[in-house]
Image (cartoon, grey):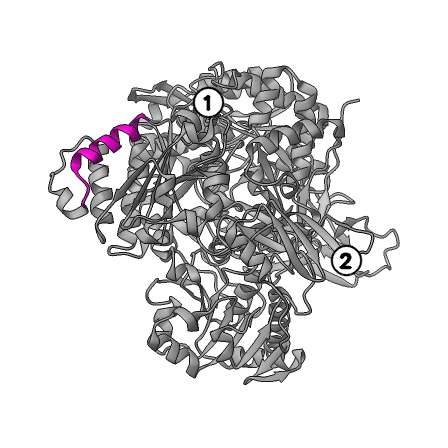
Amino acid sequence: MSTLESSTSTNAAGELKIVEDATCTFCGCVCDDMELTVEDNRITKAKNACVLGKAWFFNHHIEDRPEATIEGKPASYEEAIEAAAEILLNATYPITYGLSDTTCEAQRKALAITDWIGGIVDTTTSVCHGPSGMAFQGVGEVTCSLGEIKNRADFLIFWGGNPAESHPRHFTKYSLMPKGEFVPKGRKDRTAVLIDVRKTKSAKAADIFLQLKPRSDFELAWALRGLAKGIDIDPKVEQKTGIPLDTLRDMMDRMKAAQFGAILFGMGLTMTRGKHINSEAVLSLARDMNQHTRWVAKPMRGHGNVTGADNVVSWTTGYPFGVNLGRGYPRFNPGEFTTSDVLARQEADAALIIASDPMSNFSQPARDHLRSIKSVVLDPKLSETAKVATVAFTTATYGINTPGTVYRMDDVPIPLRPAFESPYRSDLEILKAIEHRIREHQLAGVQ
Amino acid sequence: MSTLRISGGTVYDPRNGIDGEVRELWIRDGKIIDPPDDPDVRPDRTLDATGLVIMPGGVDMHCHIAGPKVNTARKMMPDDKRVAPPVRRTALTRSGSTGAVPSTFATGYLYAGLGYTTAFDAAIPPLTARHAHEELDDTPIIDKGFYVLMGNNHYVMKKLQAGEPQLLKAYVAWLLNATKGYAAKLVNPGGVEVWKATGGNATGIDDNVEHFDVSPRQIISGVSQAVTELGLPHPVHIHCNNLGMPGNWTTTLETMKSLDGHRGHLTHVQFHSYGGNVDDQSTFCSQVPELADYINQHQDLTVDVGQVMFSETTSMTGDGPLGYFLHKVTGRKWFSADTEMEAGCGIVPITYKSKSTVHALQWAIGLEWYLLVNDPWRIAMSTDHPNGGSFLAYPEIIALLMDRSRREEVLNRVPAAVRDRCTLGDLDREYTLNEIAIITRAAPARMLGLDHKGHLGVGADADITIYSRNDDIQRMFEIPRYVLHKGNVVVDDGEVRSNEKGTLLHVAPQYDVAAVPDIQEWFEQFYTIRFRNYPVDESYLHDHRIVPTNPMQ
């Protein structure tokens, strides 16, 4: 794992610390050029951070909470580890969920625990870009690292997303603004299109805004695929999508004339009518465009290390999310083994939730069931999920307090340089201890 | 420390000139040691190998088992894994999935189960080296490492164009240190950059790569020069231009010639040995005799085969334009990923069918290579896993090489045109067990410059595979009786008994630090991560070992 020493400088009083090349894990951009000023275990300046990054760094303060609780009452760390191991060992259908806001090192331990106890492992991917993952399994994906977009892309389509507010530095650091090797004039060398159902702040940054009718993403993508292949499209597509065919024709001409195009799509595409079919249509469109010139597509991932979670779950089990290890080997079936479904059907009898808050965003039946079963929750904050936990651990925050590895939305792994130490333990340390305890029990049984 | 004696077995240890002799092996601290002079000295344990065949542990010098490309193939192919036998969790070992691209834990167990104790991933983009290390850390038992993609690297091309070989050499060394990689790898040199920029490809080694104004020939010759001067244990590892194209054998021959006396390794050479016309599939044929002849006459060159086996598999390559080509040919799902400043990637599922003349010829061309290279020390077994087939096919390949009638049996059921378009039907050669031991362990270890692998002499790692004799050669090699890694029994009669981590092998060549500011200036202009966050530090390495370099003075 990464245990990078922070490169820091300290003033004479020894209180002020500068951490260079630190990484912001708030969103999938995973910008690693932060310069953090740390005073008395608080980050007071975050140079290069966007508005979201600043909120992430400045609002991080150590809460005065017990290190661990059992049934809501303060407990020692050792008692809590023992109780957590016992819950997981005694469960017949345990589920591990979350993982997108912790390090790969911790994710790997969570996978080990789930394997040893034969549970389900699932991540927040199942409720965000899961449809894109399934689309990818259907048609593949033509994609690239963000630096390829920075250095080559002269045509950008942002689809079903609002990067100006969700990924504020995407425009400036990776896609729209930067000068690149083959686009030396930066913004001037690029054409940008925004496709969305409403005019968001991102529209201002685009050259062309196509406001499509809600729930018509698939039809729009399919019409563009047809035009790319030279097929006549029924002008009635305007009635469905709200965009005139001539506009689409013009756009396709520009797309074909580009040197290097990129479609960057968000959850506005994946979580609307059609879901993974929409993603398949857009991935297919980008693929088909390669008959004319270079095109790529890329989902705009949200959580800081959701891409790492996809990778760790995949290399460990062979499948990206929604994996059931109950039979002693991995099985994959989104809808059957994804957390919100398993909970809503009242199947799981214990849960290990890491750095995620399903009690804030799952369906009522899923929340009701989660509240009713034994759970082990690791979270830096007293989340809604931590409040209903049987065993709750207060944890250090990844990237701010703990080292480790995160994967940017384009699968580029980046090391973390923590700013200051937390009085709380890391997810990794806690999960390691739980795994250790579980293995002691299991191997005692063997011998 | 405790000693282990393996007694009574028939030893095949080609590097030490032992060809099927009953010998005792003594092991302490994971290494082979001299048997004690005093016959009264007793080992702490004895493993009775009477009647069994003993070889060094297998060494796979070219496979794809870790990193972004492999992991993407896992994610993309649930359909493949759904019908493949799973690896079940045991009290000691983790679970996993198999199919063309097994999960990491499964990969380690399957290699060990096959008697292979060392494997190298052949194509890692430097920007994602950290990912490769994380996966290798989760790949149990075997020792491992990877090769670093350099053939389409912008800095490499810029320094060639500027005529700055010293900076190029420093960069190659710096990059191997930054990635903790093992060797320099060229994949379709220059051609991948053409693909990234235009959707085209390089068609020969003298094509010009626009913007950088260099040719594949300059890349091959410049990097091989740097690797030679740095004294890396493994020479430049080349995936030639024009992979898979009819008529590509001339490109392969030109590539061999362009090395101009430098050592070089040509990988999955089967895919690069085709005659015929690109526009007429009926002209597709073998040109192995001509290429093997060149290899036979040039001691500095080595090859691995990239054998195609009739099976359902997933092709994965750093050769981006090849991925697109395969997608167009097969019409199947396609993944492509370009890595900034460095590399490309293509993944397409593929089915090799014995009824296809082209596929059957590819199968035959691979076997021709094994049979036409006279010196087994210069050819290594590979399927380019999973491209030509799974590494699990090695026992079947061994059987084909040792038994001419097995080859005939296949030749009789594939399209008749195959016999006419290659020489396989005329080749009587049958491999001996000693020659098998060479091409599956001793030779790849030597090509990799791994002095402590691939043999059973004093000081070697006690990585040992012990087989039960069987008239069915394939069966014999499929399920070794015992496999030892570092002197520990890790597999006993097919059962994996270990979950140890294995050792990461990498190089740390010296370089002129005065070159770093030039590298940094270029890096900071174009990359999207910080220069300081790029190198992989030692905390990512599990048990690791630096294999020494031997720089030219």
Query: Which of the 4 quarters of the picture holds residue B550?
Result: top right
Write the start and end of the magenta stretch as one range. Answer: A242-257
Amino acid type, mark 2: Glu
Reading the image, the residue beneath label 1 is B288
Is residue A26 rendered magenta in the image?
Answer: no
Residue A255 location in percent, x, y?
30, 31
Q: Which residue is drawn at 30% across and 33% down?
A: A289
The mark lying in front, picked from 1 and 2, is: 2
Which mark, by number, is residue B303?
none
Q: Nearer the viewer, residue B354 or A191?
A: A191
Instruction: Check disc 1 and give the amino acid type.
Output: Val
Q: Does the magenta stretch include residue A250?
A: yes
The 10 Å Cα crowd at callout 2, few under 14, some 14 to 19, many 20 or more, is: few
The numbered disc on residue A15 is 2
Q: Distance between the residues labelled 1 and 2?
A: 70 Å
Residue A388 lies, in percent from the top left, at: 48, 80
- For this view, does B35 lie left or right of residue B123? right
Q: Which residue is drawn at 38% across and 74% down?
A: A343
Q: Mark 2 lies on which chain?
A: A
- Mark 1 falls within which chain? B
